[in-house]
Amino acid sequence: MANFGIENKILQYLIIILNLKYLSATHDSNGNSSCVLYEQKFQLKNCVLINHSHLECNGNYNFCNDNKSEFFMLNTILIPYDSILKLSISDSSKLIVDPRNIIKTFPNLRVLTILRGKLIKIITSFPAEAKISEIRIDRTKLDTLPDDVFKYLSLPHAIDLRNNALAKINPESFNITSLTSLYLAGNPWKCNYNMSWILKINNNSLAMKIKDTEKLHCTSPYEGRPLFAVVEIIETLRNECKQTVCDCELIHVVGPRNSHQQINNKRQLMAFVAVNCSYRGLEEMPDFIPTNTTRLYLTGNKIFDLTKIVTNPVYREVRDLYLDDNLIESITILDGSYWLEHFRVFSLRGNKLADLPTYALENVLVQGENAVSIYLGNNPWTCDCLFTPGFQDLLLQYTNIIKDIHDIKCNLLINNGENSGKLIKDLTRTEICVMPNEFFLHPIDILNIILATTILLIIGKFIYDYWLFKRTGILPWIVTKIP
Ligand SMILES: *[C@@H]1O[C@H](CO)[C@@H](O)[C@H](O)[C@H]1NC(C)=O
Ligand SMILES: *[C@@H]1O[C@H](CO)[C@@H](O)[C@H](O)[C@H]1NC(C)=O
Ligand SMILES: *[C@@H]1O[C@H](CO)[C@@H](O)[C@H](O)[C@H]1NC(C)=O
Ligand SMILES: *[C@@H]1O[C@H](CO)[C@@H](O)[C@H](O)[C@H]1NC(C)=O
Ligand SMILES: *[C@@H]1O[C@H](CO)[C@@H](O)[C@H](O)[C@H]1NC(C)=O
Ligand SMILES: *[C@@H]1O[C@H](CO)[C@@H](O)[C@H](O)[C@H]1NC(C)=O
Ligand SMILES: *[C@@H]1O[C@H](CO)[C@@H](O)[C@H](O)[C@H]1NC(C)=O
Ligand SMILES: *[C@@H]1O[C@H](CO)[C@@H](O)[C@H](O)[C@H]1NC(C)=O
C-alpha cells in the first residue's frame, strides 16, 4: 500500500509538470460555479480525490463535459474521466441530478452516492450503457422519482433510497430483473396509498428485493406505525369491504410506533375502521360489516329495527353509530344491552321516536364511562305528564352529552296545541302536566276516598255506640237484632 501511495504521488507530480501550461489559464472560466473551463479542460471545484477511482464533491454540482474531453482537472492535476468508478456528491443546497449526463461524463462509474442536501429532482434515466452496481441517495429531500429512472439498468445493482422524503413509489418503475436489493427505510410512506404490492413476497417480486421491509413506517394518518402491518390491515379491510355495499376506511391505528424491534405483527396493533353505508336504501341494518368497524354511518336509509345491534356480534365493536334520517320508532330493544353500555356516539336525529326508555339511558349516562355524544333532535317527541318530566330531567342533566338539545321539541301534530313544537328543555312542569279537566280524578282515587270515608264513619259509629253504652247501658240497635 505504501509503495502504491508513493507511486501515485510520483505520477501526480509528473502530471503536474506535464500540464503546467494549464496553470496560466486562470481566467478562462465560463462563470459557472461548478464548471470552470481551463483551456478546454474543466476544473472541478470543491472536489477531492479520495483515491484514484473515488471522486468526492461538495455543494451544488454540474458536470458539464460538453466538449467530450477525456480529462478533467483537479488542483492542476489532469484526471481521466473514465478512471472514476465511484462518485459522491454531498450537501448540495439545490441539486438537479441528470443521470444521463453523469454517466456520459464518467462512463465507468460503478457507485453513485448522493448524500444530504436538497436533492430536488432527478430529470433523466440512467442510460442502458451504465455500468452502475450501486446507487445510494441518502438524507436528501427527494420526494418523487421519474417512472423509468432505473428501468434501463442492465447489470445487477442495488438501490438505496433511505432517509429521503419519498411518500410513494410506483412498483412498476422498480420492475427490473437486474435489481438485486432495495432499501427504503426512513421515508414518510403513505400507507393508505396503493401499497398492496409490498405484501406479495414471492420469487422475484419487488417485495422480495426490499431488504428492510420491517423498518418501513407510515406517515399520517398512521404516523410511525409499521408499514407492512398497516398495509396488511388495509388489504384485509379492502377484501371485507367488497362484501358490503358500503365504503370502508382505516381511520386510525393504535400500537407501538417507530420501534426498533421488528414489529410486523399486526396483532400488536389496534385498528379503527369507519364504514359508510349512508343513503344506500337499506331497510335493515347490515348483517355483515368488516371486522374492527368502530364507526358506522347508516344515515338516510329506511331502517326501523335495531334488533341486530343486540343480536349480531359484529356490532359489539361499533362505538360510533349514526342512524340519522331513518324510520326508527323505538330503541327499547337496546335496554340493558352490551352495546348501549359501551357506545361513544349515538346519533338518532330525524327518526320517528316519540319516547325512549329514559331510565335505561340514564343508567348508562350515570356510569358515564364511554358515552360522549347523543343526538336526538328532529324526532316527534311526545309531551305528556308521564314521559316528559323524566325525559326533560335527563336532557338538562346531560347537556354536555346530549348535543342537540335545541332541536329536541314536542311533536307538532299529536300533542295538544299549546306545547306542540316547543323545546322540551324550556317546558315548565305545569305546561307539561296541564290536564283537559283541572279537577279530574282517577277512578281508583275516587274509590280510595269512598273507602277511607266509610272506614272513618264505621270507627266513629263504634266509638259513639261504646260511649252511649257506658253512659246509658243501651246496646246499639244492631246488637239487639243479633240472635
Ligand atoms: C453552468 O453550466 C451548465 C452546463 O454548461 C449550464 O447548463 C448552467 O446554466 C450553468 N450555470 C450558470 C449559473 O451559468
Ligand atoms: C477507493 O476508496 C473507496 C472508499 O472511499 C474504496 O471503497 C475503494 O476500494 C478504494 N479503491 C481503491 C482502489 O483503493
Ligand atoms: C469547446 O471547445 C471549443 C474548441 O474546441 C471551444 O471553443 C469552446 O469554448 C469549448 N466550449 C465549452 C463549453 O467547453
Ligand atoms: C414486470 O415487467 C414485465 C415486463 O417487463 C411484466 O411482464 C410483468 O408483469 C411486470 N411485473 C410486475 C409485477 O409489474
Ligand atoms: C393497486 O396496485 C395494484 C398493483 O400494484 C393494482 O392491481 C390495483 O389496481 C391498484 N389499486 C388501486 C386502487 O390503485
Ligand atoms: C416461483 O417460480 C416458480 C418457477 O419459476 C413457480 O413454479 C412458483 O410457483 C413460483 N412461486 C411463487 C410463490 O410465485
Ligand atoms: C379486530 O378485532 C378483534 C376482536 O374482534 C381483535 O381480536 C383483533 O385484534 C382486532 N384487530 C385489529 C387489527 O385491531
Ligand atoms: C358517506 O357517504 C355518503 C354518500 O355516499 C356521503 O354523502 C357522505 O358524505 C359520507 N359520509 C362520510 C362521513 O364520509
Image (cartoon, rainbow, N blue to C red):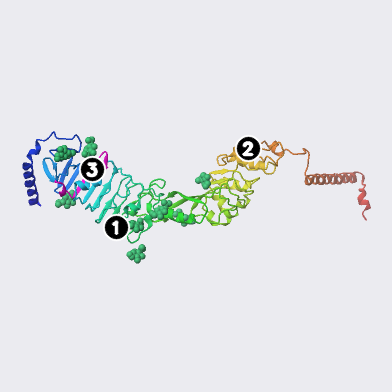
**Callout 3, which amino acid?**
Ser
Q: Marks 1/3: CA distance? A: 29 Å
Q: Give the range drawn in magenta.
A: 80-97
Instruction: Name the residue carrying label 3.
Output: 90
Residue 43's tag is none
Q: Which amino acid does label 1 sit on?
A: Thr
Question: Which percent across, then down, holds residue 248?
Answer: 48, 51
Label 2 amino acid?
Lys
Which residue is denoted by mark 1 in the rendering? 177
State the SS at label 1.
loop
Q: In the picture, which quadrant includes the C terminus?
A: bottom right
Q: Is 149 placed left or right of 365 in the picture?
A: left
Q: Identify the residue under disc 2.
A: 425
Residue sitting nearer the eye, 364 or 15: 15
Q: Say if residue 149 shows up in the picture.
A: yes
Q: How far apart are marks 3 and 2 (CA)?
A: 69 Å
